[in-house]
Amino acid sequence: MAEGMGVGAAVRRREDERLLKGRGRFTGDIALVGMKDIALVRSPLAHARIRAIRVPPEHQGAVFTWADLAKGGVKPIRAVSGLPGFKISDQPPLADGKVRFVGEPVAACVGRTRAEAEDIAALVEIDFEELPVNADTLESARAPKSKIHDHWSDNLFLEADTVVGDIETIAASAPIKVSRQIRMARQCMVPLEGKGVVAVWERQAEQLTVHTSTQMPHIVRQGLAECLGVDQGLIRVIAPDVGGGFGWKGLLQAEEVIAAWLARALDHPVRWTEDRREHLVAAANAREHRYDITAYADATGRLLGLDARVLVDAGAYSAYPFSACLEVGQVGSILPGPYDFAHYRCHAVSVCTNKPPIVPYRGVARTGVCFAIEQIMDAIAGAVGREPHEVRLLNLVPPEKMPFVNVTKKHFDSGDYPESMRRAVAAIDLAGIRKRQKKGEADGRRIGLGLAIYCEQAGHGTAVYHGWGIPMVPGHELAQARITPDGGIEIRVGLQSHGQSMETTLAQVAHQVLGVDISKIKVVHGDTGLTPFSTGTWGSRAAVMGGGAVAAACKVLVERATKIGAHLLQAKPGDAKFENGFVRAGLGHVPLAEIARVWYRAPQLLPSDVDPGGLDVTAGYKPKSDQGTFSYASHAVVVAVDTETGAVEILDYVVVEDAGVMLNPMVVEGQVLGGIAQGIGTALYEEVPFDAEGQPLASTFADYLVPGFPEIPPIRIVHMTTPSPLTEFGQKGIGEGGAIAPPAAICNAINDALKPLGATLTDTPMSPKRVFAAIAAAVPPVGGPTNGRRVTPLGVHSHDDSLAAGNKP
Amino acid sequence: MKNLALGVNGKKIAASVEPRTHLGDFLREQQLLTATHLGCEHGVCGACTVLLDGRPVRSCITLAVACEGGQVTTLEGLVNDPVMIELREAFAAEHGLQCGFCTPGMLVSARDLVLRKPAADDRAVRIEMSGNLCRCTGYGGIVRAIRRVLDARKKTKT
């Protein structure tokens, strides 16, 4: 670990002081004079036409519908993808004649308090004409009950095919063929702080200020300007302290448009605060993938080809800016994982249903993709009679092939994937677990070991995004660096830090370049009025892009300061050098603070040809290739399964990860651990189920289970460090990684435990009910034990709904 | 509206509240004490935990009018509390927070645990803290932070 406070040091966080005293300022903490609260009337139906909206006469003027917004010039949210065949849909911030999911906002009510606004909302009557509901992904794709967007021919946003090599020939000749049908449930992201907006028309600035809990203030400003039909210069978006995002705060939200419009129309500040029920019912949905996947291998387990049909349930609308094509686009391109093989076919469909739009959640499609391919790798291992890690080692891209371009043209930049797997297997003590399995457990539970490996493209930019034609294509990342008159440093970035510790890590980067004590470096972020443009914090990009940009801006400061310093030392610029906060020449040196003093307060001492831009610069950064860095990790887990109850306990969890050079190892470990906890939630607990009428069945934390202290085991982290050749310090993006592999590793561990019973799980969450059902449905292998109970629990349905074309009407 | 008299962070407060107003809203909206965060408003996540007469309660499912005559202590009122000072130091050292939204409730519960169960092992810490949800940290840093405080207090006692 590096000494000091620069890159690589486990520096304590600058953010902690205020947060630990409860002195953070979240959107809900902002109180403005004359501010009123908004409560939304939301649709109780998943699919219906609105015949009439009736507002009690005494509340006319406090209730607003789409008619008011449209009259005021508001346009629907529209996130279009340029991918061929993508169907365009409009999302009016308040329903325009039709509702398409339960929880869709229909009317906005304004009151002196939220309680009063909710009282008004309760009195608004909506006359609906119910329409047939498309709640099920498969049904909406194949046999829709109705059209969700009337002008479409079906309920599909996009169908995308990826074909490389010749899968048919491989299929005809491969000795090993294994197939799985796999489903990852719909989830909710659940940052502990819900979304919130406080909007105010600033009379003196003649500007609409929108305080909002967002990961991407500049993109929200862009989207608001488009929807409100005003210049971007008229809008300032400020993200104050933001209580977690995980993707849910990486979009333009209907409520942001509503609040922004109301603040201007009513000429007083308004606030909308998402409550937990709104969050769980109407928003923040993610995942919901179905895979019908077949792998072909030779008799040793060498992967020859992969063939998959995938459905992503994107919900009712195309969320801005990522659109309803992001996940299917990712599925097609990243399903091959970290493996080296030549023949690949993937048919991926983004299905429109009467459910909330999905938004990219930490890991985005990778969590589903890893869940699918890592189950298939275990299936291959089972078919060829080898240990799962042996089959993986046979197929992982080896270090000597790095950098490597894979079957879908992903540019893996660096790393030793097999070594991470070997270390994970050693750390989890595979041999010891196999012995223990033979012996059996005293308490009668069955233990199993599961593995998963992935690589995570992060910090990817223009090269990847421009092809999708969505409203946001990241280019150069900008940072502003300024030396203050007293020699302090201000760093300004358009990113937003909501737990990622950028107020610390980006200060470490500035310290690394400038040598100024970190306590004198202030990082300003999340405010379009104060920072240069950025697409924001998403895609594990901040360390790579923000880190690079801050370093670039600080380097310009070094150049300028060196020139002034040389002059003050009466040396030629070429004879002076910048070192640790000082310009040195010969025996003399001058500190940055003195250079700053001269620039701001004694300009008569400056060289005549000084750069008039002074000690305040904006610089841009792009990695050598913006195909992205590829961090990677192997996860190994041991579980105990109670075959009587279906309960699963995690006994041990090891992750071997490679984030390249870590800006701050403490922060990286925090990101990894937090991600794993979310991944464990995906694996074992979290699901937003819907009934046939599209009613969400988990609307409180009593129904939607977020893992707590007892559910998350101690997790062991092993670091590997392969610097990325593409980035400023060799760092790689890793923010999402932890959330990718746990469902796959835990599923493989449960299946390993249940193998002697012939039971296989393929779906998340692997709840006691699902585990129990799998055991009950199992056909034990010949000669295998029979201690799984053969009872069909109530309410459990087997699903045989293959995605293969033709086997369903 | 009902008249309400209670102590908040050692100060006597006389206020007028609707019977339906919960303690969390009362503290945040009327007293402008925003350290207390509302994470679910149905008594599960623990972010809004405050002390009522010295005991942790979830302010989102405690009606303000039910606190008549009581003493409410929020995180703001614990800034100079010796256990809280130790916890803050330990949370920073062990990376026990990321976004910081769950942190006030986490700290109030952790302080209660440190005082009530000084001999708690890690398993007991996890069970005692199971009424507080965190979505960022994966809990490891929080458990280590509480461990650090428990161990340090044991040492100073012996």
Image (cartoon, coloured by chain):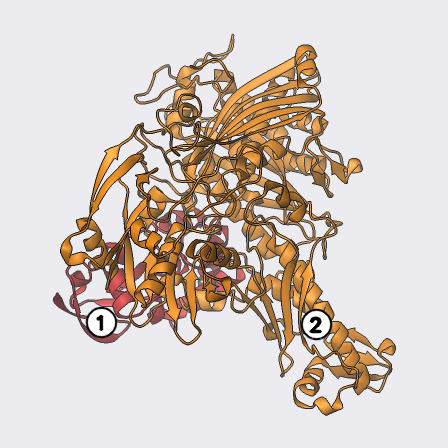
Horizontally, is B107 left or right of B8 in the view?
right
Horizontally, is B43 left or right of A580 in the view?
left
Q: Residue at x 75, y 76 (%)?
A: A560
Which quarter of the rendering shows the N terminus of chain A?
bottom right
Q: Residue at x 67, y 86 (%)?
A: A597
Q: Is residue A542 above or below residue B69?
A: above
Q: Is residue A587 above or below residue A207?
A: below
Instruction: Tell me the amino acid under the disc marked 1.
Output: Gly
Pick the front one: A347 or A114: A347
Chain B image colour? red
Instruction: Tell me the amino acid under the disc marked 2.
Output: Gly
Pick the front one: A734 or A139: A139
Residue A515: assigned label: 2
Residue at the far top: name it.
Answer: A782
Image coordinates for residue A311, horizontal then vertical, percent: 50, 28
Residue A113, quarter of picture: bottom left
